[in-house]
Amino acid sequence: MLNNSKKLFSDAKKVIPSGVNSPVRYFEPYPFFVKRSQGSSLWDEDGNQFVDFCNGYGALLLGHTRKEIITAVSNQMKKGTLYTTPTALEIELSKLIINNFPSMKKVRTMNTGAEATMTAIRLARGFTKKKKIIKFEGCYHGAYDTVLVKAGSGSAHNGISISDGGLDEVSRNTLVVPYNDIDELEKTLSKNKDVAGLIVEPVLANMGLVLPEKNFLKDLRKITNQFDIPLIFDEVVNGFRISEGGAQQKFGIKPDITTLGKALGNGFTISAVGGKNEIMNLLSPDGKVYQASTYAGNPISVAAAISSIKTINKIKNKLYPKLERYCKIMVDEIDDLATDYKIPHTINSIASMFQIFFTNQKVIDYKTSKKSSTKKFHKLFTNLLKNGIFTAPSQYETVFLSDSHTDQNITKALGAYGLSLKAVKN
Ligand SMILES: Cc1ncc(COP(=O)(O)O)c(C=O)c1O
C-alpha cells in the first residue's frame, strides 16, 4: 500500500544520495514519503495515516502544526524572513532561555544542534587553551569530525565508528569513555593533561534511551570541577523535554556550557549555546572564539522558539504530568506484553521518552545497548508501521511523545505494539 512512496524513493535515489537527506531516514525496503502532518499524525503520499512517535527525533514536543507557533511564524513572515541585523526578538528569546536555564548567563542562537555543540567545544578549547575533548561512547552530538567518534544514532546504526573522510588528526583529540563509567573517566583524566572539555548528553537518547545512574551526573560535575575542565551538557534532546529546564533542572546540576536545539523551536531550525559569562564573553567580536552564520537568529526561527517556550511555560503544569502519564502507561503495557510473549527485553524510560531493547540485560551504556537484537527491533518497527504507528526506525533512537497525543493515540499504539510484539515472538 506504499506504491507512491516506492516510486518516489526510486526517483529520489537518482538525484539524492541513498534517496534521503539524512541517513536515519532510510529503512528497508524504502521509507514512506510524507505529504503533510497535523497534531499527532503524518499522512504519506499514498494516503496512509501514521500516529507519530518519532516527532522529529524529539523536536516536536508540542506536536505538529501547533497553533500558537504557526500563528507566531505566520505573523512574522509578513514582516520579513531575514534581516541579518539584530532584532529585539533575539533579546526576548535569550531572556526566555536564561529564565528556564539559569546556568546559561548569556546565549547565542544558531541553526542546528551540530553547530551548537561545535561552538560549545570551540569555546571550551578557547577558554582552557587545551586541545582534547572527552565524550561518551554512544552519545551523539552532530555529524562532524570531533564528535563523530563512537557516536550513537545513525552512526551506530550504520556501524560507522569514525567516518571516512574524517581526519585522524581531529579524532585523535577526542577521548571516548563508556557512559556511566566514572572510574574509566578518572583514569582518562589522570592520563591526559591536555583536556579542554567534557561533553555529555545527560540523558543519552541516541543509543536507544540510556539513563544516567544514580550519581553519574553529580560525579561528572565533581570531577570536572576537580580537574578544572568545562562541563558541557548537550541538551539538544533533553532541553525542554525532561523538564522546562532540561536535565540540569531535573538532576540539579549546573554545567558550564549548555546546548539546546530540537524542542527549542518545535520543528523550526534553531539551536542555542549558552553558559557562564566568562566563557560566553569569548565569542567574537568581543572575544577571539569565532562563530558565525547567515541564518543565526533569523526572525522566523526566533519567533517559533519564543512561541514554543512561552507555550511550554504556560502549560507546563499540565504538559509534563500528561506526557509522563502516557509514557508510563505505554511502558507498563509494553513490558507486560513482552513478558507475556516471553520475549527477552528491557525498557528504559524517563519523562516523555522510552525505548525497548531485546535483551534481558540492563542497558546502561553503548556495550549493553549493542546486546539488543536489532533484527527483532526491525521486525517490531515494521509491524508498528503496518499498524499505523511510526517510531524512529532504528534501535539506537528513542520513542518520543508529544502534547498532541491523545488517549485514542495511546490505545491505538498499544494495540499495534501487541500485534507487533506477537510478530517479534514468531
Ligand atoms: C543530543 C544531540 N546533540 C546534537 C545533535 C545534532 O543536532 P542536529 O541534527 O540539529 O545537527 C543531535 C541530533 O540528533 C542530538 O541528538
Image (cartoon, rainbow, N blue to C red):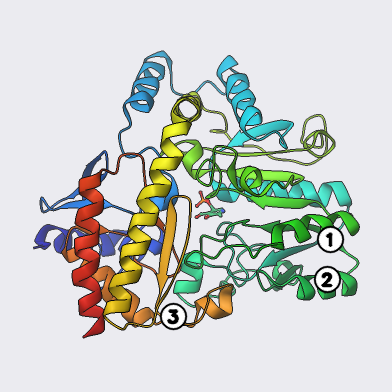
Q: Which amino acid does label 1 sit on?
A: Ile
Q: Is residue 378 left or right of residue 133?
A: left
Q: Position of residue 136 (x, y in %)?
A: 66, 67
Residue at x 41% of width, y 18% of height: 76
Q: What residue did someone put label 3 on?
A: 372
Q: Which amino acid does label 3 sit on?
A: Ser
Q: Is mark 1 within 8 Å of ligand 1?
A: no
Q: What element carries label 1?
A: helix
**Nearer to us in this view, 86 or 139:** 139
Q: What residue did someone put label 2 on?
A: 186
Regarding residue 30, the answer to whether it shows in the image is: no
Q: Looking at the image, do the residues carrying marks 1 and 2 touch, with CB atoms under 8 Å apart?
A: yes
Tell me the quadrant of the picture where the N terminus can be found: bottom left
Residue at x 55% of width, y 18% of height: 89
Q: Looking at the image, do the residues carrying marks 2 and 3 touch, with CB atoms under 8 Å apart?
A: no
- Name which quarter of the figure residue 171 lies in: bottom right
Quick check: 390 above or below 112?
A: below
Mark 3 crowdedness (10 Å alpha carbons): few <14, some 14-19, many ≥20: many
Disc 1/disc 3 C-alpha distance (Å): 31 Å
- Name which quarter of the figure residue 179 lies in: bottom right
Q: What element carries label 3?
A: loop
Q: What residue type is labelled 2?
A: Glu
Q: Position of residue 51 (x, y in %)?
A: 23, 51
